[in-house]
Image (cartoon, rainbow, N blue to C red):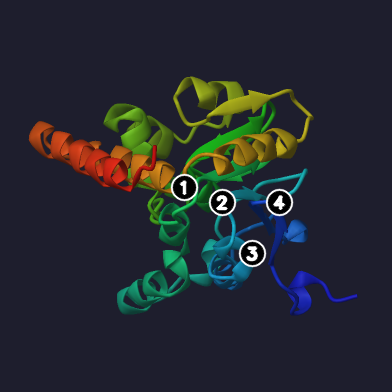
Amino acid sequence: MTTPEAGGRLVDVSLEGEVAVVTLRRPEKLNAISVAMERDLRDALAGPEVGSSRAVVVTGGERVFSSGADVTELAGRSPASVMAYYRDSGGVYEAVADLPQPTVSAISGYCLGGGLELALATDFRVAAADAIFGFPEVGSGIIPSSGGLLRLVRMVGTARARELVISRPRLDAPSAAGLGLLTEVVAASTSPLPRAMALAHQLAELPALAVELACRAIDAVSESSRGAALLVERLAYAALAGDHQP
């Protein structure tokens, strides 16, 4: 049987009704996110299952979401090489954030570093109560760099982001939810996937354009002036009202 490390796919994707389920498959490395996994994830997002879906669930399976990025792959690279990486596979986190469909992460076990950055790139996050969250990067002499800092600051503010990134506490799901990082927490030792799927199916039933514009407008107003934010809201509403059929 071919294993992921022996050349098989590191990301599986399936379609369940109108929901695409994207699953990280590197269990022997606790779903550490390698360049190869990022490329497989990029291909999955561009594939027909995700393209035809109305909502997307990202999961690492019942044991672990992701223990973080495989940082050894970038060690010792030149600045130019690292920037080329972000233009290639490293840009997949933004591809997740840019999906027009609503996205939900189902989180068990470790959700650390690059894994947490991936989860924060989705619109909603459902986690088991005993899932563990954190940004350990500074201890290794690097920082979160795949959009995680941007999204973290938006969610918790600069002071709390400094604490999470520099002091590097490990948080359980209730603590992470208390900071606003999670949408919902399910019981410890319980798979969050059924609840994430139920949420995704609910989202899939909503008018697709309204959901997409709502998400885009929320992101835009969070970093806009009052006048620009109001304009974004009103333009989005105008686009939807013109498209709406009573």
Q: Mark 4 near mark 2, Cβ–Cβ under 8 Å? A: no
Mark positioned earlier in the residue sequence (1 or 4): 4
Query: What residue would you read off at disc 3?
Result: 49
Q: Residue 17 got which mark?
A: 4
Q: Name the quadrant containing residue 78.
A: bottom left
Q: Residue 208 got which mark?
A: 1
Q: Is residue 158 above or below residue 68?
A: above
SS under mark 4: loop
The residue type indicated by label 4 comes to Gly
Q: Mark 2 near mark 1, Cβ–Cβ under 8 Å? A: yes
Q: Residue 54 got which mark?
A: 2
Q: Position of residue 227 (x, y in %)?
A: 8, 34
**What residue appears at the point 44 percent right and 61 percent down from the top-left corner?**
95
SS under mark 2: loop
Q: Position of residue 228 (x, y in %)?
A: 12, 39
**What residue appears at the point 59 percent right and 70 percent down from the top-left corner?**
47
Q: Name the quadrant containing residue 62.
A: top right
